[in-house]
Amino acid sequence: MKPAVEDVYPLTSLQEGMLLHCLRDQDPELFVNQLVCRLAGPLDHSALRQACASVLDAHPVLRTSFHAEAPGNPLQVVHRNPPVPVSSHDLSGHEDPEAALAEFVRADRRRGFSLKRPPLTRFTHVRLPGRRDVLVWTLHHLLLDGWSTHLVLNDLLDAYDAASRGRPVRLDRRRPYRDYVAWLGRQDHVEAEESFQYRLGDVRVATVLPEQAGGGLQPGQERHTDQRLTVSPERTDGWRGAARSARVTLNTLVHAAWGLTVSRFTGTSDVVFGTALTVRPPQLAGADKMVGVLLNTLPTRIRTAPGQSVRDWLSDVHAGQLELQQYGYLPLPTALATTGLAGGQALFETSVMVQNYPIDQSRWQRDAIAVERIEYFQRTDDPLTLMAVEGPGLDLVLTHDRHRYADDFARRLLDHVVHTLDTVTRHPDRRPAELATVPPAERAVLLRPRPGPAPGEQNAVLPDVSLTERDPAAPAVTCRHRRLTYGELDARANQVAHWLSARDVPAREPVAVSLSCSADTVVAALGVLRSGHPLACADPGPAGSRTGTTDPRTPCVTDPVEHDGLPTTPPEVTVGPDDPACVWPVLPGPEPDMAVSSHRAVAQSAADVVKTCELSASDVVLLLAPPTSPVAMGYLMGSLAAGAAVAFVPPRERADTGAVFEVLDHHKVTCVLGATPHDLRRWSSGREVTATVDAVRVVVCDGDGLDDADTGIVTALFGAHTRVVDRYLPSAWSVRPLVRHRGTVSPSCGDRLLVLDRDRNLVPVGGVGEVHVGGIGLASPYRGEPVDAEVRFTGDPYGEPGARLCRTGDVGRPLPDGTITVWGRAADQVVLGGRPTGLAGIAARLRAHPRVRDAVAQARPVGGRDGLAAYVVLDSGDQTDGGAWEEDLRGWIGALVPVSGAPVAFVAVERIPLTPSGQVDSAALAATDLQDRGEAAADLPSSEEEIVLAGIFAEILGVSPIGVHDSFFDLGGRSLDALRMISQATEALGAEVPLDALFETPTVSGLLRATRSPRD
């Protein structure tokens, strides 16, 4: 009796990677390929079975199983005489045979394969009406690449033709796949590693396209699907001609177009993606006819130099592709080890394959069988895979994961690739940075004109806020025990204006208000504006201070009471809509840049407030923003224009929840303006508050964006009837905040909002770039260009001549409806685990935890390394649970902050420190000493299980000692070490250690926690 095992040999690096993903993801469809062969006639089932048996006998790879639990490295085992996997499925009588066939094909893929049980392939004879049968061939990618698949298909057709005629089946014996595996093992990696070190050594950030999942999977949809586009032979020939002129290939053009497309969507000029290579070395005789997986995937890096022409750039891309092919044998993990990324972190999530291997379709025709066409299905582990199939034209197939990228986004991405190919080939002498790669229809959406202000608002000026039309006895302003009616406010503001007119103050010279927040502050501010002078705005400070002004000679109103006896009628002053209204410091410092905004802009901001809040004379407004800040001027003037009563809380009392709610209750406030998200969170923890605040109908928040929990706080505090308005101020150079809904904004009338990359190109819909603002709300530099003018301001390349844009420093994404999602400050985007991560997103994730009331994340050194400090306000009692809350939160943010990316220090604080304007006081948080907490990340193992796991870490990694929070990958572990790690840990602990846990929480403590936790 013949032995069951014919041969045993190692896996290639590519096979090991596929095996690892299969075991980790437990997805039966992963790496399952399928050919649906449409035949011209019926199949002889008996001849098919005989042909399949002959093919299995001729090709050992088709009789191979895969085993990860073997000591050392995984093995592939070739078996003798496995079952012949042939079956039939009769749809000849089905009322809708095509729909039934599609469902059968999907179900057959979902069956997957047991990797330990050969064969990992099967053939199904499907009978359709009209004697036109279908052969469905399903196989695992661990067995065959595309080239080999067609070689085996030709053998199958030859065998079937012979069997159906009653002739002996004779198939050529090919060189065995194990010879290729042995050849790989003999290659010297030193030169190849040096090449990759030169090309990738300074890469620190993975290239990841922002997710565009849309509404998720619809009922009956498959998670992975294809978007297909066929390019005509004429268009393709044009590309081939351009490639010849540039002395490159169509393969190079496709890679360059994908690289430039990814660059525009990610907002970076330096991108990396995977390239699938056919590795059939000419020095290995018979490699071109060998059957197996003679493939590799290696990283392609594409950069654009500022002064480089498209022609030269393509030449560089071509040279890189040639070098990649030269070292195509190098294992992907070895190539990744030359980068600056920690082990276990993906360098790329997209890949490209240009299929130009020989497919002779004439061989699909035999006397006994004829294949009319073949439909291909394949699954990889990349969320996006572009395949280009060369023929007379070019077939482009983009396979995408719908959990990550919706169908419409994938389709637009494919359109971008084609448009980029057109653009690149038409303009070889331009710079890549100059190429307009956004298709015309999408460009029209991004540049869609916005309506201007209403006719009555175009020429508004702030002195037009007429207080005399109001009931003079109606309350206008109140702060603590100081109260002014509209009549009193009007008269006293006019007195201040007359006082200033009598002073020797140059026309249009800014005048400061040096008062702490009070009703007199409003008198002084309104008086300055009525005098025709711009108001020098500043954050509140002690009385007598000149915060925000750079010149000590700047006139300053200190006490409006001193002006009693002056006329109470308005002075004769003419102010135009483009005259300066407010001047303020953009950045703190001894000589800060100063911005000036027009009356038109501030008046428009006031009109925005009235419309957004639907203000009327029946409203009572609590203004939390400092009344002399530029944004608060819009709140204040809008409230007064509507005839509302305006109440203030002194800045020193803003942090006192009881004081704030006393004002809300006492004055029966209906609108809260200028709150911040941290105000809401602080109020929610004020359990001692018993004030009645159900009169509040709208709360307007500025600053960091609100999340769902913040909206819930408003409902809990004020009632379900209370509306929440979230406003976004694009820049310190802007005076008009925009209404934000779930992080999404659109420009107000008369304003302009664009997302551009560093070369001022339009970022495509769904891409990422920097938000730029222009239009009415954009201020101008006061007295000369600011220090950072060249960095901050830029001409509007898509606007009227002379129009300017301001870089906001915020990261944004344009959406298909013309709105923009704002992700937060670019400066707050930190690289953790090789991926850009927003600190605001981490804080929002922490706030979503049931234990956490508020949270702030900062990039801080932790234990001597770049890391992350998470400051959290916990529910009372959670700090007394022996530190379990830290482990709980560490796992909670694991998806955003991989442990292999950076150490995390959690700091429980009583409250988040805020500035007088309600923003986070970063300086106060930065003063926290993290040294002790950083050292805690290296806690040595103490329990028996921790000691055992730490010993396995040390054995595999060759590193000692091992702390319970030390990352397996930070210490040098690689993805392929994971199989050994999990195998040994499972045996040592006597319990299954989940493979995915090593990637999610690759620490001793994380693995033990995952092993103990029950899994669905």
Image (cartoon, rainbow, N blue to C red):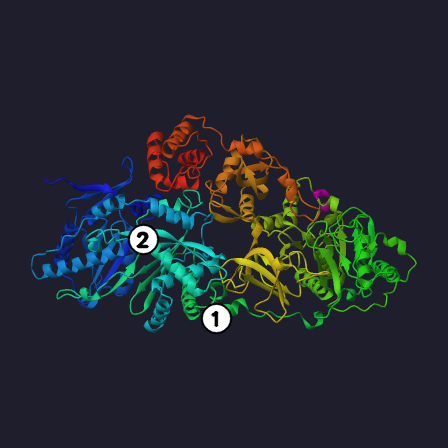
Name the spot of residue 725 as percent of width and height, x first: 63, 56
The residue pinned by badge 2 equals 326
The image quarter containing residue 209 is bottom left
- Depth check: 497 or 180 in front? 180
- Depth check: 165 or 344 in front? 344
Vertical comparison of 321 with 874: above or below: below
Quadrant containing the C terminus is top left
Tag 1: amino acid: Pro
Name the spot of residue 170 as percent of width and height, x first: 10, 56
Sequence-first disc among 1 and 2: 2
The residues bearing labels 1 and 2 have C-alpha atoms spaced at a distance of: 39 Å
The residue pinned by badge 1 equals 440
Dot 1 falls on a residue whose secondary structure is: helix
Q: Quick check: is 776 in the magenta stretch?
A: no
Query: 10 Å neighbourhood of mark 1: few (<14), some, or many (≥20)?
Result: few
Q: Quick check: is 657 in the magenta stretch?
A: yes
Residue 379 visible to the viewer: no
The stretch of residues the image draws in magenta is 655-660
**On the picture, is 315 further left or further right than 493?**
left
